[in-house]
Image (cartoon, grey):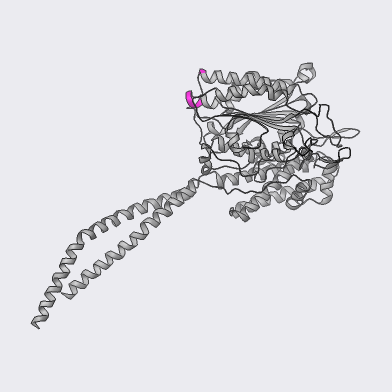
Amino acid sequence: MKKLLNRATEKANGTKRLTTFLFYAYPLISLYGLFQFATSFFLAKKSMSYKSLCKNDTASVLLQNEIGLSLNDIKYLQGYGILAQQYQDITEDLTISEGCWMPRRVDSMAVIVVDALRFDFALEHLPKSIGSRIAYEEIGKKQEQQETLQQKTRGQSQLYKFVADPPTVTMQRLKGLTTGGLPTFADISGSFGGANVDEDSWVDQLHNVPASKRGFKDYAQNQDAEAKRKVQMAFVGDDTWVDLFPNQFDDSHPYPSFNTRDLDTVDDGCLLHLPRLLKSFGSKSMYNNEGTATSTKNDESFFYEVIVTHFLGVDHVGHTYGPHNVHMDAKLNQMDEVLQTIFLKIDEAVEQCQVVFVFGDHGMTEDGNHGGGTVEETNAGLFAHYSPGCGDLGPSLDITGTEIGSYSEAAFRSVNQIDLVPTISLLLGLPIPFANLGGVVPGLLPPLHYHTDKDIIIEAPYMATSLALNAAQVWNYLTTYSNTASKLPESAISDLESILIKASSQFRDALAQKDTFDSMAYREACGLFKYFLSMATDLGKQVWTRFDTTGMSIGISMLVLALFLGVPYTSIRGAMKEAMPTTKTSSSRVGHILSQCMKFE
């Protein structure tokens, strides 16, 4: 009888231990599986509050620390106007700079976002504005000797395939297009409002950096400086911009964007304000390389240095009717007309260098939607149009990366959306945002001339320095992030460092050949720096935008295991509850029998 009782007790204890194990294991495995899947699917990047500084020595320090340039190299680049310098305006006791890091290259800029402008839309469905200028670029160069006067005063244009990173949602794309970073799916909740940008951006830099430090005479030296700003930034269109940048625009006209059935409200608002904005667009008050003013415009009148316009109708037509229908044809025709008006305004700037960038923040699928990573969703269009005052853009296009191999050439051909960020920053004389991962697009930078007794084009050293400074900024960000926020893969960082060392060495060798402005060493340095920047972007995508399929698989496996453990746990608990009264009764009976036996003894 005692053996029977011991056996029953041992069995009960074993069941209890198993139940206790399942009691703790089931929720722990479930939670771990859920956590593993969530962190692998909703990739997150930690924001960093660091800002790039608008100081001439910031660029010098970056080039010395990250690229290994000497102080003599820095002075050489400053002497030819490749790196920015400061000048003292004795008449007004002002310190004026050509730019924060590099000399400012354009007087004014218009940024036109046509939401969901796919590359094929830009190439095939905007014949008056984009189509006619692409044809001019192709035909005009072959008939240079037979150009009419009208053709000579027409600006130059370029069309690119503009590759977006998923998620292809407007809020995330605008973050990337202003910070140069890679927003993730974890940020997607911000699409419903309240997601202001907390990282460095060219919009924030443009608002905060005084005009005198980025190539303009500072008009705001009085006590009421902000109220009397003469160099202004204007915005009209999709209110997502104001959600991201609530206080940065001097003249702001946001329109609600959430109703995808509303095809015209935002676009009509843009058309209402654009004529007034374009009337005050641009200024002649930029400083030349000698530090003397070139202004012929009345200093009492304000002007718009940058205009941002965001049309939304193409996107809403896609959501409502799809990409191929009469509604889309009508909306694209409307965009064609307004873009033609803007381009004609740019063409009037014969003495100023003005540029307009027209692009889509993403594309759309054949059913009119977006958000994922298909070719239709990620391949938007980017069209750049320059005024005649920018000069011939031809020399910029000569450096293609072919000098060091196909891998570098591919980096030159591909234009990621975040590549526009460092390009805009250098064009406007701003520092490149601290967390930028984009690479300068060489073909979008007007050629740099050094004016002496002969007009020398120093394109190769300028381009190499631009890419070197860009590479130094990206490397500084990646190492800072890896050391302070979250460790990046060591093997990838090591590979990047080896490319950077090789590119830096080639750049220093080129600089050692004084007054040689188009050597093979410069071209090879450009190719290596561009390759480094493309690999850095790929690393960012790998860490922050591509799903961790291994982690997701582990998470799903853990959840399945938890499900299997949950079945026996539930069964055992149920069986124990049913058996508990019986066990208690049997134990009482055994105890009663034993007590009776003891009496007989």
Looking at this view, is 270 or 521 the one in front? 270
Q: Quadrant of residue 363?
A: top right
Is 242 located above or below residue 570 in the figure? above
Please give the name of the residue rendered at 63% of the width and 18% of the height, measured from the top-left corner: 337
Residue 283 is situated, as x and y percent measured from the top left of the image, at: 77, 28
Residue 104 is situated, as x and y percent measured from the top left of the image, at: 77, 36
Is 508 located above or below residue 415 in the figure? below
User: How many marks do you count on the picture?
Assistant: 0
Please give the name of the residue rendered at 36% of the width and 53% of the height, measured from the top-left corner: 562
Highlighted magenta segment, given as a residue range: 318-326
Residue lying at the far bottom in this picture: please name it: 601
Q: Is residue 576 magenta?
A: no
Is 231 located above or below residue 185 in the figure? above
Q: Quadrant of residue 409?
A: top right
Q: Quadrant of the N terminus?
A: bottom left
Looking at this view, is 250 or 442 the one in front? 250
Residue lying at the far left in this picture: please name it: 600
Looking at this view, is 129 or 245 the one in front? 245
Q: Quadrant of residue 593?
A: bottom left
Residue lying at the far right in this picture: please name it: 453
> In the displayed structure, does residue 333 sit left or right of residue 355?
left
- Residue 401 visible in the picture: no
> In the displayed structure, does residue 265 sit left or right of residue 281?
left
Residue 142 is situated, as x and y percent measured from the top left of the image, at: 74, 21
Is 541 located above or below residue 453 in the figure? below
Residue lying at the far front in this picture: please name it: 223
- Residue 555 visible in the picture: yes
Residue 411 is situated, as x and y percent measured from the top left of the image, at: 65, 39
Q: Quadrant of the C terminus?
A: bottom left
> In the displayed structure, does residue 27 sit left or right of residue 214?
left
